[in-house]
Image (cartoon, rainbow, N blue to C red):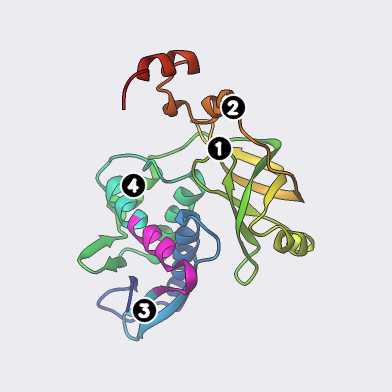
């Protein structure tokens, strides 16, 4: 079974440098769009001439890989059509997509079942037109450490306290042991934090990680983390509004 297929130099002998560089950047893009760093990718198809490589998400986190594939196609199609940065993409994913298209060459495409996206000039121009705002500062993120991967770069993933999208983490090799010890526990990761224009933290370049006691969130805290729970109302206003309703 193939979940996503990359073709480089369609219809002509493939350039090896383009093929391997494009494959690397495709994996980076899939990693940045997955909800966990533990997705594993296996080569399910490989053909010569025009270089064609099929990838399949394997292991316990296959569904997260399939969701990342859907995000790749939906996002690239949106950008190709001039729709701007997709809501579920972060600036790192955007840079990965730019590198993928830049290195793949004009006659390259991605396929997944009935979906085809050409990695051509139209897509490259759409990607180049997007320049997201990024804020970087020293800080920390707390949440459950949901994944740690050292087989293809030192990567981890955190489900932040209070909910929201996963935060990706990069870390130096000396921190690998501490990251593994914190897996599936509530941790605090300190380092250089990156936020997008909406103020959402999407990446941490970790310098330290600590297992900490998970705090119990009050209703007041929850309103701060997830204002949509009460529709922006105070707790008193919200409870008064639903009083007597099923």
Crowd band around label 4 with a 10 angstrom C-alpha radius: few (<14), some (14–19), many (20+): some
Out of 206 and 13, give the one closest to the viewer.
206
Which one is earlier in the sequence, the residue at label 2 or at label 1?
1
Q: Which residue is mark 1?
A: 162
Q: CA distance from mark 4 to mark 3?
A: 24 Å
Q: Tell me which segment is drawn in magenta.
A: 56-70
Element type at mark 3: loop
**Residue at the image position 55 percent from the left and 36 percent from the top:** 134
| Residues at marks 2 and 1 touching, judged by CB atoms closer than 8 Å | yes
**Residue at the image position 33 percent from the left and 76 percent from the top:** 2
Q: Report the disc number at residue 221.
A: 2
Element type at mark 2: helix
Residue 203, given in percent of the width and then of the height, sits at: 59, 46
Q: Report the disc number at residue 14.
A: 3
| Residues at marks 3 and 1 touching, judged by CB atoms closer than 8 Å | no
* Quarter location, residue 145: bottom right
Q: Report the disc number at residue 125.
A: 4
Q: Residue furthest right?
A: 174
* Quarter location, residue 7: bottom left
Relative to 175, say whether 203 is above or below: above
Which one is earlier in the sequence, the residue at label 1 or at label 4?
4
Q: Magenta part mainly helix, strand or loop?
A: helix
Q: Residue furthest left?
A: 114
Residue 208 lies in magenta, yes or no? no
**Residue at the image position 43 percent from the left and 46 percent from the top:** 89
Residue 151, given in percent of the width and then of the height, sits at: 62, 72
């Amino acid at each position: 079974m193939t979940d996503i297929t990359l073709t480089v130099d369609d219809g002509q002998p493939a350039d090896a440098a383009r093929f391997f560089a494009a494959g690397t950047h495709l994996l980076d893009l899939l990693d940045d769009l997955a909800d966990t760093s533990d997705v594993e990718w296996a080569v399910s198809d490989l053909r010569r001439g025009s270089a064609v490589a099929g990838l399949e998400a394997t292991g316990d986190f296959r569904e997260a890989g399939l969701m990342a594939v859907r995000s790749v196609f939906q996002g690239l199609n949106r950008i190709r059509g001039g729709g701007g940065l997709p809501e579920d993409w972060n600036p790192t994913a955007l840079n990965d997509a730019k590198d993928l298209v830049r290195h793949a060459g004009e006659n390259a495409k991605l396929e997944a079942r009935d979906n085809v996206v050409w990695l051509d000039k139209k897509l490259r121009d759409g990607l180049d037109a997007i320049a997201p705002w990024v804020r970087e500062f020293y800080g920390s993120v707390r949440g459950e450490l949901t994944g740690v991967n050292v087989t293809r770069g030192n990567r981890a993933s955190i489900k932040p306290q209070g909910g929201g999208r996963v935060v990706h983490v990069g870390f130096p090799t000396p921190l690998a042991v501490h990251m593994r010890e914190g897996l599936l526990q509530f941790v605090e990761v300190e380092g250089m934090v990156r936020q997008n224009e909406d103020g959402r933290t999407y990446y941490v370049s970790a310098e330290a990680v600590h297992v900490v006691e998970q705090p119990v969130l009050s209703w007041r805290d929850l309103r701060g983390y997830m204002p949509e729970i009460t529709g922006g109302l105070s707790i008193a206003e919200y409870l008064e509004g639903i009083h007597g309703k099923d």
